[in-house]
Image (cartoon, grey):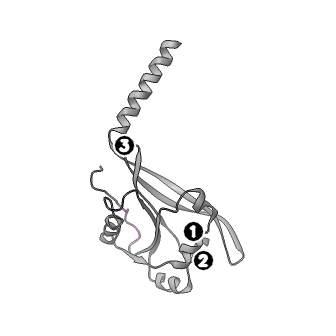
């Protein structure tokens, strides 16, 4: 039993060392559940596709991107002016992105990639205010993330991100 425990500890240390010596990209999702607006309460969620870039064990950049259908209850967080701007938009998106050091990995890298894939930025001040007052915003430690709205005229293509130094 003792030999098994020693082998497990050594294996764990070796695996930990292997992970810390490389840059890696991790994909997953993030859900912001429930909301309120104008005395209406809902339990549906915005589901963000999450891409995280790690250098050794440190998170250096992260992108969370979610399409937001016009029948989503979260759509009421947009102001009337924003809804008018979104009228011709095939797919509205919400983007959250984080950079550990924006001098090395500026937010503009991802924004340029979005523009090349048919996205245009939209101003979403009311949505941003509602989002930042959601209880999960602080619990999920999103205060260091940039929040932007985007419109994509074509809705059927997959969104691809890449950062220099990562595969």
Q: Position of residue 114 (x, y in %)?
A: 35, 68
Is 138 rendered above or below residue 39? above
Q: Position of residue 1 (x, y in %)?
A: 53, 12
Q: Position of residue 138 (x, y in %)?
A: 59, 60
Is 43 rendered above or below residue 27? below
Disc 2/disc 1 C-alpha distance (Å): 15 Å
Q: Residues within 10 Å of mark 3 (few under 14, many from 20)?
A: some
Toward the left, the furthest residue is 165
Q: Which type of secondary structure does the marked residue at label 2 adopt?
A: helix
Specify start and end residues of the magenta stretch as a single range: 155-159
* Res. 76 mark: 2
Is 128 rendered above or below residue 45? below
Disc 3/disc 1 C-alpha distance (Å): 30 Å
Report the residue marked by disc 1.
132
> Where is residue 34, by image quadrant?
bottom right
Q: Residue at 48% of width from left, 13% of height from top?
A: 3
* Res. 56 mark: 3
Q: Nearer the viewer, residue 101 or 50?
A: 101
Front of the two marks 2 and 3: 3
Q: Is residue 56 visible?
A: yes
Q: Which type of secondary structure does the marked residue at label 3 adopt?
A: loop
User: In the rendered structure, does residue 44 fall within the stretch colored magenta?
Assistant: no
Q: Is residue 71 visible?
A: no
Q: Residue at 42% of width from left, 22% of height from top?
A: 10
Q: Position of residue 33 (x, y in %)?
A: 62, 61
Choose the circle earlier in sequence order: 2 or 1: 2
Q: Residues within 10 Å of mark 1 (few under 14, many from 20)?
A: some
> Where is residue 35, by image quadrant?
bottom right
Choose the circle earlier in sequence order: 3 or 1: 3
């Amino acid at each position: 039993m003792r030999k098994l425990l020693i082998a497990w500890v050594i294996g764990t240390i070796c695996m930990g060392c292997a992970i810390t010596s490389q840059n890696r990209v991790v994909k997953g999702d993030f859900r912001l559940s429930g909301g309120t607006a104008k005395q209406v309460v809902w339990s549906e969620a915005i589901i963000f596709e999450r891409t995280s870039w790690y250098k050794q064990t440190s998170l250096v950049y992260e992108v969370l991107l979610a399409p937001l259908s016009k029948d989503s209850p979260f759509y009421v967080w947009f102001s009337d002016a924003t809804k008018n701007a979104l009228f011709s938009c095939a797919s509205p998106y919400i983007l959250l992105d984080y950079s550990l050091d924006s001098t090395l990995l500026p937010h503009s890298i991802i924004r340029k990639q979005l523009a090349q894939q048919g996205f245009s930025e939209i101003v979403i001040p009311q949505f941003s205010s509602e989002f930042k007052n959601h209880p999960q915003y602080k619990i999920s430690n999103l205060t260091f993330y940039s929040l932007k709205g985007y419109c994509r005229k074509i809705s059927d293509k997959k969104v691809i991100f890449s950062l220099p130094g990562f595969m």
